[in-house]
């Protein structure tokens, strides 16, 4: 089994899901007392979030490059960046290391296409929904991407940072998300990308709405498990 490095803490709530789900999948695949070989480097999200709000992505990239190199020095075979939003600086992180960074958008796009779905809506932070770094990566695989209205984007962003990232799960927020999803369905969405690793905390049931929900955290973890159990490096 290869050793995976988790670059997490953005937020720690979703990083906990990465650790839990990756161990579950490895145990299911190998049986018995098997668990995942993981080295976790968890950053202080407050520092990253401040740079996000300042638009200082260069400084954020430098911090994550430094932390990724720590994982490489610890002899991991590959790295997962345990967040959707900070894949904005994924190219810079990959440039700083020689081990592969398994990109969450690539894994998600490949998984969706296997379901014969080509038009999907993207939910996430405002950065993820409004900037091109994530949408372009998905579209490069052949997907058509819808995003919510400006009002809905602001609500989703607020809910992620002020509720989900601090562990608050509110029924009213869940219903609001379902209403947003219904509107996107009316626009032709065949599925919904939960493009923030915390959203699955609010919508954990795949039957929460009448569209497929694509949990990027779980998809990313499954990609990692395949990498860890494969003989050849990606």
Image: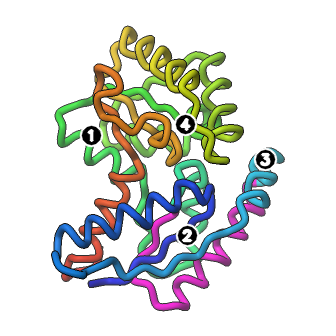
| Image position, residue 130 (x, y; %) | 60, 32
Residue 40's spot in the image, x, y percent? 53, 76
Distance from Cα at disc 2 to Cα at disc 3: 21 Å
Secondary structure type for disc 4: loop
Q: Quadrant of residue 29?
A: bottom left
Dominant secondary structure (helix, strand or loop) of the stretch shown in magenta: helix
For discs 4 and 1, the disc positioned in front in the rendered view: 4
Closer to the chain start, of discs 4 and 2, is 2
In this orientation, which residue lies closer to the viewer: 166 or 148?
166
The crowd level at tag 4 (other Cα within 10 Å; few <14, some 14-19, many 20+) is many
For the residue pair 43 and 16, the one nearer the viewer reads as 16
Residue at image point 22% right, 77% down? 229
Labels 4 and 1: the sequence-earlier one: 1
Q: Please give the residue where the numbered disc 4 appears in the rendered image.
A: 124
Q: Nearer the viewer, mark 1 or mark 2?
A: 2
Position of 54 relative to 150 (above/below): below
Left or right: where does residue 81 sit relative to residue 29?
A: right
Give me the residue at 35% from left, 26% from top.
Answer: 208
Q: Which residue is tagged 1? A: 112
Disc 4 or disc 3, which is closer to the eye?
Answer: 4
Determine which residue is flagged by label 3: 55
Query: Which is nearer the N-term, disc 1 or disc 2?
Result: 2
Q: Is residue 70 magenta?
A: yes
Q: Which residue is mark 2?
A: 7
């Amino acid at each position: 089994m290869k050793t995976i490095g988790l670059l997490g803490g953005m937020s720690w709530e979703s990083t906990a899901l990465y650790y839990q789900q990756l161990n579950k999948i490895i145990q299911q695949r190998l049986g018995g007392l098997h668990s995942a070989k993981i080295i976790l480097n968890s950053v202080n999200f407050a520092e990253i979030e401040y740079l996000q709000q300042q638009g200082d992505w260069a400084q954020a990239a430098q911090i994550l490059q430094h932390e990724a190199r720590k994982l490489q020095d610890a002899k991991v075979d590959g790295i997962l960046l345990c967040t959707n939003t900070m894949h904005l600086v994924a190219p810079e992180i990959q440039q700083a290391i020689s081990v592969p960074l398994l990109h969450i958008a690539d894994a998600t796009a490949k998984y969706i296409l296997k379901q014969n779905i080509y038009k999907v809506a993207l939910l996430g932070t405002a950065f993820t929904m409004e900037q091109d770094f994530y949408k372009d990566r998905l579209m490069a695989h052949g997907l058509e991407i819808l995003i919510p209205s400006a009002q809905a984007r602001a609500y989703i962003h607020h809910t992620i940072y002020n509720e989900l990232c601090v562990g608050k799960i509110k029924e009213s927020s869940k219903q609001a998300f379902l209403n947003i999803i219904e509107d996107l369905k009316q626009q032709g969405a065949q599925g919904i990308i939960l493009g923030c690793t915390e959203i699955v905390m609010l919508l954990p049931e795949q039957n929460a709405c009448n569209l497929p929900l694509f949990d990027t955290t779980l998809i990313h973890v499954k990609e990692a498990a395949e990498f860890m159990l494969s003989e050849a490096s990606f």
